Image (cartoon, rainbow, N blue to C red):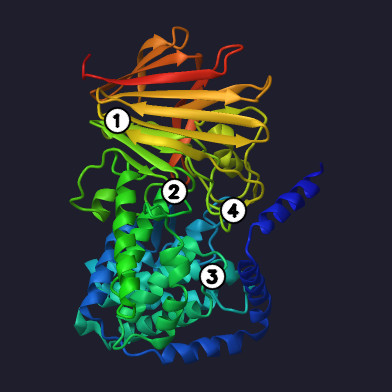
Amino acid sequence: MSSFIRTLTTALRAISYVPPHALIGHARRRYRNKTVPLRAASYRAAIERVAVAFPEFAPSEPAHRAAAVVAVFQEAKQAKNVPDCLAGRFTFLNRTVDFGSAEQIDWTVRADAGNHQLWRWNLANFGYACTLMDRTPEEGLAFVAGLIPGFLRSADFSNGAVFSETWHPYAASQRTLALTAALVRAPAALRGTPDWTRVEAFLRYNVAFLLRNLETELGYNHLERNLSALALFGLSRARFPPAIAAALRRNFGPVVEASFGEDGGQLERSAMYQSLSVQSLRILREVPIWTEAQARLIDRRLGSVEAALAALTLGDDQPVMFNDAWIGEGPPTSAVLPGAPAVGFRAMPDCGYVRLACGPFVAVFDAGPIGVDMNPGHGHADFLAIETSVGPHRLIVDPGTYSYSAGPVRDAARAWGSHNGPSVAGMEPVEFLGSFKVGRRCAATLVEAGLAPDGRQSATGRLAFAGVTVERSVALTPDFVLEIADRWAGAGDAARTSRFLIPAGWRIIEGSTGEGRLVMVQDDLRVEIRALAGTLSTEAGRWSRRYNVWEEATALVLAPKAEADRAGLRIAVLKAGA
């Protein structure tokens, strides 16, 4: 099959999963991108008419509570940019660009390799405005006001490309969150000054744009971010704007009802977005327009989403890296959930995750789908994979997300064999296309999960497609021993492996793969890894827990012996110094 036919077939399969209302939304977005540049002045004027009609700025106590939530998230991400941003120096996604001065900022800079310029998005999000104005309100306000003319010149609607970048609704949502929080938290003495007036007018403009460009075609975390931004802005007004209230009510179902399982899992299955959902729901619960039933559902959702975030967090206080996720997009979990008790065993059947935890050992098992069929763009083929930590150190890791840009690196990071679930060479359960399209897909299922009276925690998952079935069972005992048992069926003569990535911080000090036993150490922690069945080998590997950053790893490859259909590992935490 030619590459063109393969691409076309995958694209058509991807489209076949998209419901009609979303297809119409995608078509409207493309129509907007093509036609607005032809009528940029009238489009701009229409937005301005809506912007000036919003009620006056008069933040209530709920607005201050919601803004404080946003400030925690912005501080975690933007502290590294303050005060450097004042001199035109910015660090996003582990890359730094020094423009020389704020006046020389290039809003079209290409800091990322490939087609997805996420660094540029972060620059345009204005998140640093919130953190900067928290620390130096007057200087920060003047700085932000000074950025706006250059931004607007660069992001003029006469250029259709801006709708995919600086005026992408997600970027407008992030700007709205940051700027609203910054103004709400700023000293009242700054209100009405020329700088404050310019920033507040720019904020209104963003909200007016967002109201007519909600991402209903994508839903989930995108629409959730849209609504939380509108909600925070609405809370900052003397009266809640009717147009915003209508948008929130209209989209309550797709976000609050449909984006989460009853177990609290965000159904795109990224723990990074799980954390951001806590922010969104904390903002939405402050909104005064809900019915009693809606308010109760928001409170219930928030509690379950917070509990799910805690369950998806490893011993380093950061969420797991399954699907699209990286460290640094949000705060450590302890900052999001201060004072939350430690989580032991927890099964989350709706989102397909199981947490096993005892003492220093934490494991999270993935036995769910790649994502929601309508929009699985952030999914990876990490079926039946596991991530573990011992104390504050990750032991078995996911390859992570190095980049969103389409190409071999992203394809490899999302591929089945790159993850540590049992896989079969030459087969793929998922078709990926570009950065986010998914054609053929399948789902792992959680067969069982339970906590026995003796404290033994266990879970089993299964994946079946194209005549192949793989299964993994995991169990954690009260004496800190994790057992992993993998089984393959229907693979024929194809190579069958499970490839576990272990960060380079863990050093082998005893044993060998030949004897099927390794002892590894990091700081004062030791673990023993034994092959229960099958053979072990090692090879060089790498993983990415921070966007744009590779880290070295040892790939421990487990394979069943000839004629066998099973292989397994036993990982025991040893006493320090044992």
Name the residue beneath numbered marker 3. Answer: 216
Q: Position of residue 505 (x, y in %)?
A: 35, 28
**Placement of 228 over or under 289, stated as above or below:** above
Neighbor class of circle 2 (other Cα within 10 Å; few <14, some 14-19, many 20+) is: many
For marks 2 and 4, the one nearer the N-term is 2
Crowding at dot 4, Cα within 10 Å, few <14 / some 14-19 / many 20+, comes out as: some
Using the image, tell me which numbered label, if any, was put on residue 436: 4
For mark 1, what is the residue?
452
The answer to whether residue 328 is left or right of residue 223 is left
* Of labels 2 and 3, the one closer to you: 2
Gap between marks 2 and 4, in whole Å?
A: 20 Å
Which residue type does callout 3 highlight?
Answer: Thr
Q: CA distance from mark 1 to mark 4?
A: 40 Å
Residue 351 is labelled as 2
Q: Are marks 1 and 4 in contact (CB under 8 Å)?
A: no
Q: Position of residue 515 (x, y in %)?
A: 44, 7
The tag earlier along the polypeptide, 3 or 1, is: 3
Q: CA distance from mark 2 to mark 1?
A: 22 Å
Q: Amino acid at mark 4?
A: Phe
Within-10-Å neighbours for mark 1: few <14, some 14–19, many 20+: few
Label 2 and label 3: CA atoms lie apart by 22 Å
The numbered mark, 4 or 3, whose residue comes first in the sequence reads 3
Q: Are there few (<14), some (14-19), or many (20+) residues within 10 Å of tag 3?
A: some
